[in-house]
């Protein structure tokens, strides 16, 4: 998944002797684990709470994986790094001798110190994840290596992950297809008297049946529920004339997607239909503006201005989309103050949400890929029409 040549180049540009990944997402991205934090992957959710994992990247050397002993079997199966180090006590206990003649080290921090010392990373600049490296690790490394400057490389990881390789693109595409199938199944479950939970479960079951995992998924029926962004699926039973909004995610082999659709049970409200036409048009204009080199802030302005000029002058958003990949939402965010530009290889979710106490919740969201032949909409098989359920 990670493009090492691009990684080495960006490390050189930032004058980094080494780069350490410490978040579960970036350990997966750099090391190839079948993991995604939002999915609650059982193995890595456990590891995240038992002990941290790291990957250490240094140009000209084999990348190193450092992991609790409890993840040894998973690492040996999924990680493409040849140099794998482990610390702590195995669970269940592993009575075999440490791999490759390694001595047992019970502290992750101590193991990290030993690896860096062996690699010669004792001075210069080392990139770390400022948002994720535990404070005790930062302080411990700074004390042990007083000549080593630790540099926040969160943005470097974000920019590496924003440009996808073919395997990553294929995974996001497949996750999107799974979500589309899940939505179609959920549509068929909508009938008068069905609860939000029942309808959403139809989506989850179909995604799972098709070989994926669901994540960050919600369904709201009725105006009050739909207008509440943080609404959780409930026992509310959908009634004729109710608007209904899906905002769903799916995961395929560690990569995510994000889709949204809206409809009504039975009769469509005219004002809601008018609003939806505006939102759909705004999304289409945003997608049409996506070309390599175009400022992401410009894409944002195209969409927001269209909604404002179409009868909703107070419409204001902090973003109208985001990258999708290892994380459900990741850089770049399609926001007014973004300094990013559209680049080939990006996979982006483009959405135009609108929440109103009078009308309910509305959104249309699709995932697009910026490729050699232009923009590909991964969810093109899923109708963008305002849905009429029942």
Image (cartoon, rainbow, N blue to C red):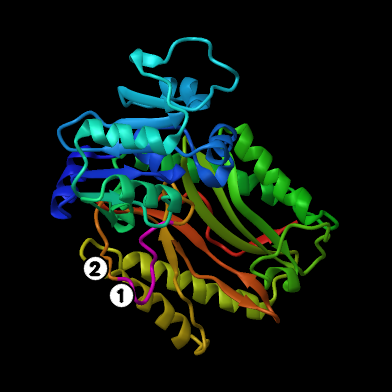
Q: Where 196 sits versus 280, above or below?
A: above
Q: Can you name the residue that lies furthest to the right here?
A: 193
Q: Mark 1 Cα within 10 Å, few/some/many (few <14, many 20+)? A: some
As drawn, is 138 to the left or to the right of 120? right
- Residue 50: % across, % down: 56, 36
Residue pictured at 46% horizontal, 75% vertical: 318
Kindly identify which residue carries mark 1.
298
Find numbered disc 1 in the image and state the secondary structure of the residue it sits on: helix
Q: Quadrant of residue 172?
A: top left
Provide residue 349's location: percent of width, then percent of height.
44, 58
Question: Residue at position x 31%, y 51% from top?
Answer: 142
Is disc 1 in contact with disc 2, using a CB cutoff of under 8 Å?
Answer: yes
Percent from the top left, x then y, of residue 32? 38, 32
Quarter of the N terminus within the rendering = top left
Q: Is residue 333 inside the magenta stretch?
A: yes
The region drawn magenta spans 330-338
Say whether residue 338 is left or right of residue 246.
left
In the rendered structure, the answer to whether residue 136 lies left or right of residue 128 reads: right
Q: Nearer the viewer, residue 375 or 171?
A: 171
For the point 48% across and 77% down, which residue is it? 317
Tell me what residue is drawn at x 70 percent, y 71 percent: 268
Magenta span main SS: loop
Asked whether 107 or 314 is in front, the reply is 107
Instruction: Work out whether residue 370 can be spotted.
Output: no
Residue that mark 2 sits on: 294
10 Å neighbourhood of mark 2: few (<14), some, or many (≥20)? some
């Amino acid at each position: 998944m990670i493009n090492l040549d691009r990684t080495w180049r960006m490390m050189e540009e930032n004058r980094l002797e080494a780069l350490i990944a410490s978040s579960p997402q970036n350990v997966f991205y750099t090391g190839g684990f079948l993991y995604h934090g939002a999915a609650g992957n059982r193995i890595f959710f456990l590891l995240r709470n038992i002990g941290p994992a790291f990957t250490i990247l240094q140009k000209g050397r084999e990348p190193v994986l450092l992991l609790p002993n409890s993840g040894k079997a998973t690492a040996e199966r999924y990680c493409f790094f040849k140099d794998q180090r482990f610390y702590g006590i195995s669970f269940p206990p592993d009575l075999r001798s440490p791999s490759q003649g390694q001595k047992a080290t019970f502290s992750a921090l101590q193991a990290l110190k030993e690896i860096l010392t062996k690699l010669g990373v004792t001075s210069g600049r080392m990139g770390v994840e400022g948002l994720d490296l535990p404070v005790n690790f930062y302080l411990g490394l700074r004390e042990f290596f007083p000549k080593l400057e630790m540099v926040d490389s969160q943005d470097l990881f974000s920019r590496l992950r924003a440009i996808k390789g073919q395997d990553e693109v294929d995974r996001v595409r497949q996750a999107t297809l799974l979500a589309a199938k899940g939505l179609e199944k959920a549509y068929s479950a909508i009938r008068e008297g069905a609860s939000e939970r029942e309808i959403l479960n139809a989506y989850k079951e179909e995604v799972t049946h098709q070989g994926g995992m669901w994540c960050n998924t919600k369904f709201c029926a009725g105006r009050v529920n739909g207008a509440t962004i943080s609404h959780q699926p409930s026992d509310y039973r959908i009634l004729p004339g109710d608007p209904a909004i899906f905002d769903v995610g799916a995961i395929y082999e560690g990569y995510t997607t994000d889709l949204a659709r809206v409809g009504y049970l039975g009769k469509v409200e005219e004002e809601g239909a008018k609003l939806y036409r505006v939102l759909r048009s705004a999304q289409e204009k945003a997608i049409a503006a996506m070309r390599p080199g175009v400022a992401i802030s410009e894409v944002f302005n195209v969409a927001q201005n269209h909604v404002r000029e179409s009868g909703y002058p107070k419409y204001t958003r902090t973003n109208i989309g985001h990258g999708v990949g290892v994380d459900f939402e990741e850089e770049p965010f399609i926001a007014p103050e973004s300094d990013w530009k559209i680049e080939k290889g990006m996979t982006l979710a483009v959405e135009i949400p609108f929440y109103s106490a009078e009308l309910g919740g509305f959104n249309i969201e699709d995932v697009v890929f910026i490729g050699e032949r232009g923009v590909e909409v991964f969810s093109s098989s899923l109708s963008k029409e305002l849905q009429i359920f029942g």
